[in-house]
Each structure stands twice: as structure tokens, then as C-alpha cells.
Image (spheres, coloured by chain):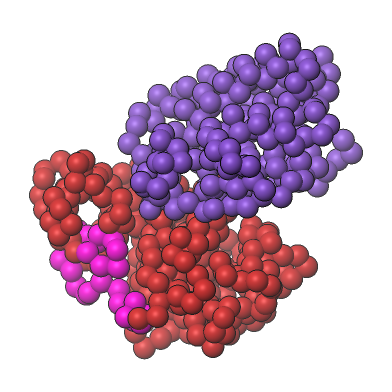
Amino acid sequence: MSRTALCSDRVLLNDWHVVADLTNLSPTAPFHTRLLGVDLTIHCRGRYRLQVVRSGSGEPVNSDSRYGFLWACLGTPERDIVFVPEANEADRHLVTGGSIAVNVSGLRAVENFLDMGHFPFIHTGWLGEEPHTEVAPYKVELTEADEVMATECKFYQPVASPTAKEGFVVDYIYKVIRPYTVALYKSNPVHKVRLDVITLFVQPVDEERCIAHPFLCYLKEGVSEASIRSFMQLIFAQDKPILENQLPKRLPLDPRAETPIRADAVSVYYRRWLRDRAVTYGAIPARV
Amino acid sequence: MITLYDYELSGNCYKLRLLMSMLGIEYKTVPIDFYPGREHKSDWFLKLNPLGQLPVIEDDGLVLRDAQAILVYIASKYDPSGTWYPRSDPALLGEISQWLAFADGITGTASAARLHDGLFYELDVEAARAGAHRLFRILDEHLWFGEQEGRDWICSAPHATVADIACFPYIMLSEEGGIPRQDYPAIRRWCDRLKRIKGFTVMSGIFPAGPARAA
């Protein structure tokens, strides 16, 4: 049922979503994907001649390229593609991390991205390790741009990045920019006052499946693009089986549906924020 | 020292990392941007392996491709106990080769389904899943009958061999290709035994065994 349900959330229909990493497109064969339950075909006739159409009717869909990805909007765009200011800084690698399909609602994928509590257990030896399991209290607030922001997040990480040589307490800032877009700002192991940025653009394939498209803006010093990709995929592939075993596959927005702990403050805020903005696609709406 | 041309999410590369970890040998890795960079199809890599596939190793000037072939090489050269690939036992060697070929069949089915579901490879996923279930059924029965005879491993030996290593990764990763393992209890028990071998190491998507009961 929910796999084929069409989306009626205007905020999603009239927004831009990543539908492909440009690297995955080939002029020799069309690329098939799905967005918000709608089957799409991408024709690639040279680098600057990309076209996205609805698979059945061939009707064109709004599309644009940015940050190494192809974007589509099924309705009428009401705002621009998410702006990533760090993408304009010359001393950063701008890397698409490798798009990976995940058999769960994209909202679950965003929520998992916001969670520090699982680091020692799922990313053992990399983003956490026992006995350093405590998530210290952090702040959650709404920004002027209507984003959910978590600050003062700190976590001890044995191998925090592709270049980390030893464990250290890493400072994090999380930001939910749009319902299916989340960013993480994390201290660079060389220049600890500057932040590496990972933005996760999640493509809602349908209500119970998504594709995670990570976009990485890492300071270049001492790190190669290949090792950034490799690290991102190492970490993300550890999350994948956990995400795919979450039940229900859609994200429950009812505050009584799942029991949060203090470490979940940002996730509680995110669910309420989705509820208040009437996002229902990929969610189990709260009972009233 | 062995150099492994490696990709973290490749079960075939993991087979070699796993055996080398169990043997306690040191090695270097050269990470290959397999996805989305397709570096394994680049000119420089095709000179190393014209098939454009991972893994490849270099060791003392020898360049070798194919996970199963490399397992045989590493075990023959670096396993002082001679148990992972017992070169003096013809019947056992025959059995090992049979199951190494079987492991290739698992790659052609279970791994293909995983690439389809996770990384958008275009292929007949239903055929791949059906093929994997057929192989899992055969292996599950083989292991179940083995357990009745007191045999813990795939081949007729009181210890694991490279055949166990070769079959393990894409079975453990099968759910990423929509292939559940509920119906294969003997496979699940065998996987747990393998995870408890000294030197076992994980890859992304495979977790360690739970708290061990006395073996």
C-alpha cells in the first residue's frame, strides 16, 4: 500500500530532491529511479543535456544540476535547491559520497544521522567505543531559517575521520535543513577550529524506501577525495542493516509511539517539527 | 608484504582481509574508488586486472586476481599450520575446490541482488534472489547433515578451510539484496561459529557474534 502511495505533501512536491549522482549517469543507457512514488527516467545526452521525465507518460519534470547531483522537482519549485555555503570555499574537496539505497523511510535515515547514541555500538572503533557511551546534554533550537539545529554536541571518537591518527572528543553541530535534508558539521582533525561538513540529501523513493546521497565538503589538507568517499561508505554501510531492520519502516510522529531518552532530544524535536509542518510522506501521522 | 587493492564494501575483498586477519599477517591496502568512481574500470587498473574486478593482490612481484584464487595462494604460502588449505590431502582439496566454485555461485546471485538493491545495478533481481535461495538451501542441508555427524565446517575436516571463508561474506550480506536467512538455521549456526574463530574481523554490514557461549 504505502510503497505505491503518492505524495500529497505540498512542501515536498514543490521542493527539489536529488535523484542521481551525475557520476552514475551514462549517455548509453537511461537511468531509472523513483521519487515520492513516481517512476522517473533520466536521459543523458551529454553532460549538459540531462532530461528527467515521468516514466509512463514521458512528461518532463523540472530538473537542475548542482553539487555533482541531478535534482528534480515534481511540482512547481517554491524555493531554491538547498544552499551549501562551504561548497564555495576553495580549500575544500567537494565530493559526492556514493548514493546508496536503503530499504526504510527517508525520515528514519535522517533521524539516524542525528543520533549519537548508536556510535559506540554500530560504528565500534571508528565513531565510538565502549565505555565512552554517554551522550552529554546538548542544545536544540530552531534557527531563523526554520531549521532544527543541535549544538554543543560532543562525543569521543577513536577514528573520527579518514585522517584522524588518534581518538579525540569531536565537536558536532547538526542541522535539519529540510524534511529530507540534514547536515553535520564536525571538527577537522588538523584544524580543530574549522568544521568538515557532510550534507545528507535523502531521496524519498517511496514511503518505505529511500536513497541516501551524501555530499562532503572536507578541508583538503592531508586527505584525498578517494579516502573521503571510502570513509563515508564504511560508516554508512554500518548503519544500513540497522536502518533496514527498523520497524515500522515509516517514522512514527506520535510522541507516544516510541520511547525517547534524553540523548534523543534532537530527534524528538525533529518529529515535532515534521508534525507542525504537516509532513506525512514517509511518516505515520500522530493520532489526534 | 602483500598489497591488497581493496574496496570496503566488497565481500570478495573482505574474504582476503578476513583470512589475513585470522592468519595474523600484515598487509597494505590501496583503496579503490569502486563506487561511484568506477576506478576498477580505469586504464591503470585494467593493466593490473583486464577483467576490471576486485580484489587484486601484489606479493613479491606476483599479481593475482580472483578472491578464491587469492585465498588458495595466501593459505598455501602463509598458513604454517597448513589447515586452511591442506595441500597433502587430495580428497579434502577436491572438496575445497568444489565449494570455492559454489562460493562463486553465491557471488553471482546473492551479491548481484545486493548490488541491484543498494547500488542500482541493472539486472534480473528476482532471478538472482531465486538462485541465491537455491544455493542457500543446498548449503543449509549440507551443514545440517554435517552437524548430525559432528562436522562443524563445510568440508570434511575438524577445522575451517578457505571454503568457509569464501562462502561466508555474501551469505552474511544477503539481506541487503532482499534475501532473508530465517529459513536456513544451519547456515546461521555455521556463521556464528565462523565469527568465533580467533582473529575474526568485521566489514561494514557484518557485526560480531553476540556474547559467546562456551564453545
Q: Give, as a single range, the part of the protein colored magenta.
A: A65-89
Image quarter of the C terminus of chain A: bottom left
> Given the current orientation, which residue lies at the most extreme top position?
B91
Q: Residue at x 35, y 81 (%)?
A: A90
Left or right position of B182 against B196: left
Q: Residue at x 58, y 37 (%)?
A: B62
Left or right position of B145 against A78: right
Q: Colour of chain B?
A: purple
Q: Which chain is rendered red in the image?
A: A
> Given the current orientation, which residue lies at the most extreme front position?
B61
Compared to residue A98, the image places residue B58 above or below, namely above
Question: Residue B160 is drawn in which quadrant?
Answer: top right
Q: Is residue A199 visible?
A: no
Q: Residue at x 17, y 61 (%)?
A: A63
Q: Is residue A88 magenta?
A: yes
Compared to residue B156, the image places residue A132 above or below, namely below
Q: Please state the horizontal and vertical placement of residue A257, each as a whole percent of the image.
A: 55, 60
Q: Is residue A194 magenta?
A: no
Front-most of A145 and B50? B50
Image quarter of the N terminus of chain A: top left
Q: Please state the horizontal and vertical placement of residue A57, each as a whole percent of the image.
A: 11, 43
Q: Please state the horizontal and vertical placement of residue B52, each as a whole percent of the image.
A: 41, 38
